[in-house]
Structures are given as C-alpha cells and as structure tokens.
C-alpha cells in the first residue's frame, strides 16, 4: 500500500446532509424511518471516501446486505437542520461487518441518533461469502 493509500485509510468516515422538508412527519421532525435512508447515504459516502464505488459489488459479484439495524433516537431533527454522520467499523468477520454511527446536529453540536448496522456479504445465489479483498483492505481498516 502506498503512503497516499495509507493516509486515505486513516481518514474518518464522515457524511454531511441537510434535512429536507419532505422528510418530516406530522409532528414536525424527521420521520424515524428516514434515518435508515440517512445511514444508507452515509455508507455510500463512506465507500467513496475509501475509493470504492457501488459498481464494485457487481464487479466482484458479492453484495453487502443489511441483516440487522439498531437505531437509538436521542433528539429530533427538523427541516433545514445540518447533520453530520460519523461512522466506524466496530467488528468484522470473514463474511460480515458492523458499522456504528453517530448523527450530530452540526449547528447545535447535539447528538441526534446513534445506530448500528450489521452487513453480510452474499453472492448471486444469496449465500454468505467472504468479504472481497479490496473492500476489506480499503473499508475495514476503519475498525476501532
């Protein structure tokens, strides 16, 4: 691995977004189900930060699927709130990995949500398979 690749692997997993009005529920805050979309966006941003792209999964013919999600809501988020999602790998095995998240309101510095998602890599037959080497090298290096 080159020095630039090593440096890139040490960069934190971070994603930014601004809450849209259509994501509100009837109580005036982000609908709790919308946070799953935020986590998906963050995972895609995290991959790009690490030099990976969604099309890589098709190239490898191995796909990470969410098999478990746990979200703990701390404070509501509302339209136009600017959020940052920090992430890190808390565990991985031969075929799975677990991502931890903190969603923070950037303007107030308040924790909005903590979450965890567990992913298992599967093949075209929906059978668990070993995590692709390139993914492990670039992405799983963020394990704490």
Image (spheres, helix red, strand yellow):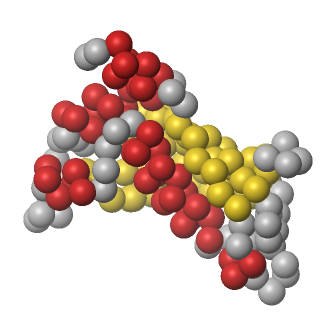
* Residue drawn where x is 53% and y is 37% of the image: 13
Return the x and y of residue 106 as percentages of the image width and height.
79, 47
The residue furthest bottom is 26
**Residue 64 vs residue 37: left or right?**
left
Name above or below for residue 88 compared with residue 64. Answer: above
Q: Nearer the viewer, residue 90 or 141?
A: 141
* Residue drawn where x is 37% and y is 51% of the image: 119
**Residue 29 vs residue 116: left or right?**
right
Q: Nearer the viewer, residue 37 or 52?
A: 52
Residue 143 visible in the snapshot: no
**Residue 10 vs residue 67: left or right?**
right
* Residue drawn where x is 85% and y is 48% of the image: 107
Return the x and y of residue 86 as percentages of the image width and height.
61, 41
Return the x and y of residue 100 as percentages of the image width and height.
55, 42
* Residue drawn where x is 62% and y is 64% of the image: 35
**Residue 125 vs residue 49: left or right?**
left
Name above or below for residue 35 compared with residue 25. Answer: above
- How many numbered circles does the render carry? 0
Residue 21 lies in what quarter of the image? bottom right
The residue furthest top is 3
Name above or below for residue 90 compared with residue 27. Answer: above
The residue furthest right is 108
Residue 36 lies in what quarter of the image? bottom right
Return the x and y of residue 135 as percentages of the image width and height.
27, 38
Name above or below for residue 25 compared with residue 56. Answer: below
Screen quadrant of the N terminus: top left
Residue 66 visible in the snapshot: yes
């Amino acid at each position: 691995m080159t020095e630039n690749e090593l440096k890139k692997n040490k960069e934190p997993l971070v994603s930014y977004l601004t809450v849209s009005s259509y994501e509100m529920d009837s109580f005036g805050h982000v609908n709790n189900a919308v946070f799953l979309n935020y986590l998906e966006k963050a995972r895609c941003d995290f991959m790009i930060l690490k030099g990976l792209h969604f099309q890589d999964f098709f190239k490898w013919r191995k796909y990470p699927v969410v098999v478990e999600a746990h979200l703990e809501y701390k404070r509501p988020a509302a339209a136009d709130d600017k959020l940052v999602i920090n992430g890190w790998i808390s565990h991985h095995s031969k075929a799975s990995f677990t991502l931890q998240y903190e969603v923070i309101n950037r303007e107030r510095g308040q924790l909005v949500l903590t979450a965890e998602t567990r992913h298992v890599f599967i093949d075209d037959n929906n059978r668990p398979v070993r995590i692709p080497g390139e993914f492990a090298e670039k992405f799983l290096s963020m394990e704490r």
